[in-house]
Amino acid sequence: MIYLLIAILLFSLNNVLWKKNLASISISLLMTYRALFTSLLAIGLLLYFYDLDTFTRAQFLKTSIASLLGAMGLICMLNIFKKTSLQWVGVYNLLGIGFTILYLWLFKKLEIYTSILGISIITLGFGFYVYTHKNSTLKISFKQHLILLLMVVFFGISTIINWENLTDETPAILIIANQESTVFICGLILFSTQKKTTSLKPILQKYFTRVLLMSIVIFLGLLFSFLGLKITNPIISGTLFLANPLTTILFSSLFFKEKISIKEWIAIGTIALGAFLLHLQTQ
């Protein structure tokens, strides 16, 4: 549980950093630049602690499939971050939980009834947050709704595959190394297809410190999330990650001085209560 809570905080900070930096740099360049650091770090740790010959082709194949789907989900998410509010990603995360629960009920027959109360309270809190924004002026196009739906599918399937990888004793560092290498390759391909109008050197120098910080934050976030996912199931971890968009708002308030309404505080408090009850129910 503690691993997942730390991961939520790190992912929320990562979302703020993505949004802030994407205001003045392309998605493909920032995606490639950040993944360069994380992939080198993960590969270095993988080679230091493991012998690659001990991994099977099936492990490499399954982690590669999950990594590719995760990279496609990331591209969808960053397109939304670039053009509109972070809040829409949070709204669609709820659909992602439903997708995961449906899969596990149909194919894995997982027992979740002892966690119903905690899950229900967290979902209620998140639903209340969404309800308070039903009359918001933050509107998005039909195309952006489709992009968000694709994001949910890509991330949902990727999470399920990674959960199965972890339960099959595939090391988290192998998954991270594969995933970040895939993100780097995808970002590089996207960047190579775009027209370059300015020199890269000053941009890379300007964003070096920012990207290095992003790399450390997301690497630790991924590590803690996979460690947490290994000892629980996607329903519990996914439901807890409903708190992610709300903690993102807290970080936005801290870094960008954005106001949080009383209703939003109530929603955040409800989710915190649900997370605490879920922790007690899963001991």
Image (tube, helix red, strand yellow):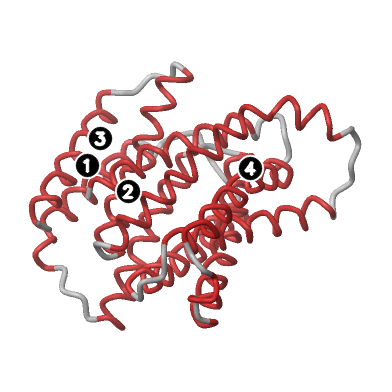
Q: Which residue is mark 3?
A: 268
Q: Which quadrant would residue 258 be assigned to in this image?
A: top left
The one nearer the camera, 106 or 55, is 55
Question: Tag 2: residue type?
Answer: Leu
Report how far apart the C-alphas of labels 2 and 1 lie in the structure: 8 Å
Seen in the image, is 5 located left or right of residue 220? left
Q: Horizontal and vertical percent for residue 195?
A: 89, 46
* Foreground disc of the pair 4, 2: 4
Element on which disc 4 rests: helix
Report how far apart the C-alphas of labels 4 and 1 lie in the structure: 31 Å
Question: Which disc, if any, is residue 10?
Answer: none
Question: Tag 1: residue type?
Answer: Ile
Q: Please report contact status of discs 2 and 1: CB closer than 8 Å, yes or no.
A: yes
Q: Which residue is mark 1?
A: 271
Residue drawn at (51%, 82%), measured in percent from left and top? 58
Q: Which residue is mark 2?
A: 242
Q: Horizontal and vertical percent for residue 80?
A: 58, 45
Report how far apart the C-alphas of labels 4 and 2 lie in the structure: 25 Å
Q: Please report contact status of discs 3 and 1: CB closer than 8 Å, yes or no.
A: yes
In the image, is residue 30 above or below residue 63? above
Q: How many marks?
A: 4
Report how far apart the C-alphas of labels 3 and 1 lie in the structure: 5 Å
Q: Which residue is mark 4?
A: 34
Report how far apart the C-alphas of labels 4 and 3 lie in the structure: 30 Å
The one nearer the camera, 192 or 184, is 184
Q: Earlier in the sequence, mark 4 or mark 3?
A: 4
Q: Please report contact status of discs 2 and 3: CB closer than 8 Å, yes or no.
A: no
Point out the residue furthest to the top here: 257
Q: Earlier in the sequence, mark 2 or mark 3?
A: 2
Element on which disc 2 rests: helix
Question: Tag 4: residue type?
Answer: Arg
